[in-house]
Image: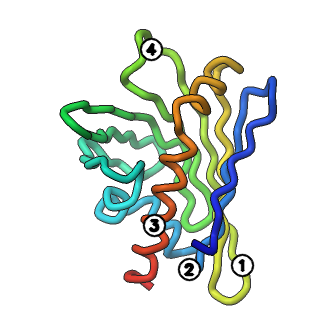
Amino acid sequence: MANKTEVIAEPGKQELFIIREFDAPRELVFRAHTDPEIYVKWVGPYGMTMSIEKWECRDGGSYKYTHERGGHTYAFFGVNHEVLAPERLIGTFEFDGLPERGHVILGKTTFEELPNGRSRIVHQSVFMSVNDRDGMVQSGMERGVSDGYEKLDLLLVELN
């Protein structure tokens, strides 16, 4: 694929950044992040089936979805703090499979317009601790994010 997903996780910091360009307009990329019928088709690694249990894509709304593979189910949930089309999404994210609660991630995704009908997203995740951030990086999240954006590239061609 022409567009590469860049994950930046500087040692010792509680944050990471994901930067990705798309050959599609900003409005369409934003819609792919907020429309559950599109979102369910691209988020997560190859080989997993996604189901959305709750989807309130508005300020103060919440969400919950699962990925399933080989009889194993992984649940994720959070709250949307700001949904500002087509500029920005701010909200929390948690993985339901940890031994204890409280490993909340605060995320901010900005959608930038580029020339020639292209766009870029810049996502910043701030973790409760450096250990939480490092655990997420070591979990293979980069592969899941890259796989998801490759699937999104194909969907955007269909939708554009």
The quarter of the image holding the C terminus is: bottom left
**Horizontal and vertical percent position of residue 130:** 71, 20
Label 1 residue SS: strand
Label 3 residue SS: helix
Mark linked to residue 114: 1
Residue drawn where x is 68% and y is 47% of the image = 7
Residue drawn where x is 54% and y is 65% of the image = 85
Q: CA distance from mark 2 to mark 4?
A: 37 Å
Mark linked to residue 24: 2
Question: Can you name the residue that lies furthest to the bottom here?
Answer: 116
Residue beneath label 4, please?
101
Label 2 residue SS: loop
Whichever of labels 4 and 3 marks the residue nearer the N terminus, that label is 4
Q: CA distance from mark 2 to mark 1?
A: 9 Å
Image quadrant in which you'd find residue 95: top left
Amino acid on which the number 2 mark rests in the picture: Ala
Cβ atoms at labels 2 and 4 below 8 Å apart: no
Looking at the rendered image, the disc whose residue lies closer to the viewer, 2 or 3, is 3
Whichever of labels 2 and 3 marks the residue nearer the N terminus, that label is 2
Cβ atoms at labels 4 and 3 below 8 Å apart: no
Residue beneath label 3, please?
152
